[in-house]
Amino acid sequence: MKKLALALTAATIFCAQAHAGFADSMRDLRGTLSQITDTTKEITGVTKELGGFKSGGNANSSNFKSGQSLYPKINNLALYQSANKSSSVLTKLTKNTDLIFSGNASNNGFIEVTTEHGNGWVEAHLVQ
């Protein structure tokens, strides 16, 4: 009888630990799914904002005035040395970085800005 009671106690402890591990895994999964949902909502918002953007022109830069204060729409916005994605990235900008539009725009959707990190080019559709 003692052996049976000991075996049942051991089985109960093992099941409780396995269940706790499963619950922790489910909690972690729920957190990950929540992060994915938040990221998807942010991407959807940016996509809607870009709906009217036409690539290959100064579509967005015409909305900006020389000297206008702008901000990145996203974190880690690349500040390029010249007006193309293959040029050197000078730094990555956060959403609260102050940008001043210089008035110069490329024909491929970039605008020249001045930041606390120096002058560079950013993609016009990623600033507001």
Image (cartoon, helix red, strand yellow):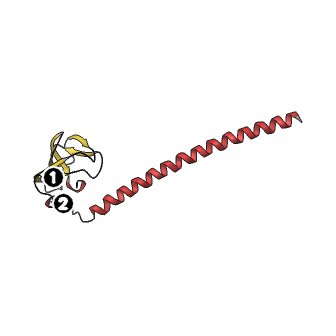
For numbered disc 2, what is the local secondary structure? loop
For label 2, the crowd category at 10 Å Cα-Cα, with few meaning under 14, some 14 to 19 and many 20 or more, is many
Q: Position of residue 48 (x, y in %)?
A: 31, 63
Pointers 1 and 2 in contact (C-beta within 8 Å): yes
Total marks shown come to 2
For label 1, the crowd category at 10 Å Cα-Cα, with few meaning under 14, some 14 to 19 and many 20 or more, is many
For image coordinates 13% across by 61% down, the residue present is: 62
Q: Position of residue 103 (x, y in %)?
A: 10, 53
Nearest the camera: 57 or 8? 8
For image coordinates 58% across by 43% down, the residue present is: 24
For image coordinates 47% across by 52% down, the residue present is: 34
For numbered disc 1, what is the local secondary structure? strand
- In the picture of the structure, the residue carrying the numbered disc 2 is 60
For image coordinates 73% across by 38% down, the residue present is: 13
Screen quadrant of the C terminus: bottom left
- In the picture of the structure, the residue carrying the numbered disc 1 is 111
Screen quadrant of the N terminus: top right
Q: Is residue 43 left or right of residue 8?
A: left
At label 1, the amino acid type is Ile
Q: Position of residue 95 (x, y in %)?
A: 28, 48
Spot the residue most to the right.
Answer: 1
Question: In the picture, residue 87 is in which quadrant?
Answer: top left
Give how far apart the Cα atoms at labels 1 and 2 are: 9 Å
Circle nearer the N terminus (1, 2): 2
At label 2, the amino acid type is Asn
Q: Position of residue 54 (x, y in %)?
A: 21, 63
| Relative vertical location of residue 59 with respect to residue 34 in this rendering, above or below | below
Q: Specify the label residue 13 is tagged with.
A: none
